[in-house]
Image (spheres, rainbow, N blue to C red):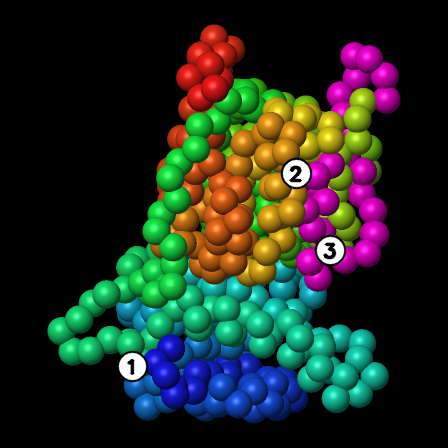
Amino acid sequence: MAVGHRTRILIVDDSAVMRSLLRSVVSADASLEVAGTAADGASALSSLAMMRPDLILLDVEMPVMDGLATLRELRRTGHKMPVIMCSSLTQRGAKVTLDALASGASDYVAKPTGQANREAAIRALGQDLAPKIHALTNQYQSPQATQQPGQNSALPQPGIPGVQRAPLFPHAALPPRAQAISSRPTVLAIGVSTGGPAALDILLPALPGNFPIPVMIVQHMPELFTKVFAERLDGRCKLRVREAAEGDPVRAGTISIARGNWHMEVLAASRAGFPPTLHLNQGPLENHCRPAVDVLFRSAAAVFGSGVLAVVLTGMGSDGTLGCRIVRDHGGAVLAQDQASSTVWGMPGSVTNEGLAHKVLPLNELAPEILRLISRTHIEARELRESVV
């Protein structure tokens, strides 16, 4: 955002109570301002020219025009600002929210439930929402705030219809030099957060049905959402996709997605001839997350050693960085999504800036690189090891 520009937020929700809660969260931050409110999608769309929002908070379920229809119309008509969906923690809410994320929404927040009073609800909502607003409005730039007449410096975000990406951060380092990978992967572990549903919707269907190694994923997402998310991906992928369950074997042919609110780790085989298994636990939050990418990565490294191929995709924060260091210490390989194709370059940016990524690639180049690494013969891997000694 331009210096001195307060981020303008448009609140769209048919509930007066929810509009009031969202207004309180926005008003509590001096760098944000409420551009306006609307009770349905049609009213919001008709007011865009007047309100000029930098970001929209959009309810999922509304009369006249619901959130998904509103989002699709926004993108169809060329509006580029980030959109955060406000969803109820229900199965229907999860399904519609995931549809919205695949249609160009940037992120989502769960509506507060079970708080003792209004102040507690505002506090809970603000802790979740405020960091997402800042991450998305630092990563994206509104035409009003950044673009001069005749200029068009924004980049399209691959895979996210109609979303405009800001240029790379002014302080971003030069692209890191690719590092040689000497190990042959025997397991693929993926960590992802903000922007993950849309990114995985591109990456995972590109893996063939005979993909020869197990795939495990930590996506930061509420408990109810992960089951719906796995079912959605299962219908789009050639591999079987399922929400992880306690004791699941870690085998090729299956993509296991960590259950929301549960860490997922790999346990070594109990006896010879049996595969490693998944263990779910509700241990302490790590990096303010459960499930945490670090938990998966370090446990995978302990079991699979140099066979781990860790991939860090779009997301806020730095979850996965410590895990990638452990993967590297065990001789494994690390790939990171590049900044230009990430919704938020927090997690992959942290891994990259720590020098842990062997390669930093656009989203649409990650699947080909994964397949290239896995299809290499043992002879090629040995020759590569010898060439870098």
The disc at residue 326 is 2
The answer to whether 327 is drawn above or below residue 164 in the figure is above
The disc at residue 255 is none
Q: Is residue 136 visible?
A: yes
The answer to whether 290 is drawn above or below residue 19 in the figure is above
The Cα atoms of the two marked residues, 2 and 3, are separated by 15 Å
Is the residue under label 3 in contact with that under label 2 (CB below 8 Å)?
A: no
Crowd class of label 1 (few under 14; some 14 to 19; many from 20; radius 10 Å): few
Q: Is residue 149 left or right of residue 372?
A: left
Mark closest to the chain's N terminus, 1 or 3: 1
Amino acid type assigned to the residue bearing label 2 in the image: Ile
Find numbered disc 3 in the image and state the secondary structure of the residue it sits on: loop
Crowd class of label 3 (few under 14; some 14 to 19; many from 20; radius 10 Å): some
Is 277 in the magenta?
yes
Q: Which residue is mark 1?
A: 144
Q: Nearer the viewer, residue 103 or 340?
A: 340
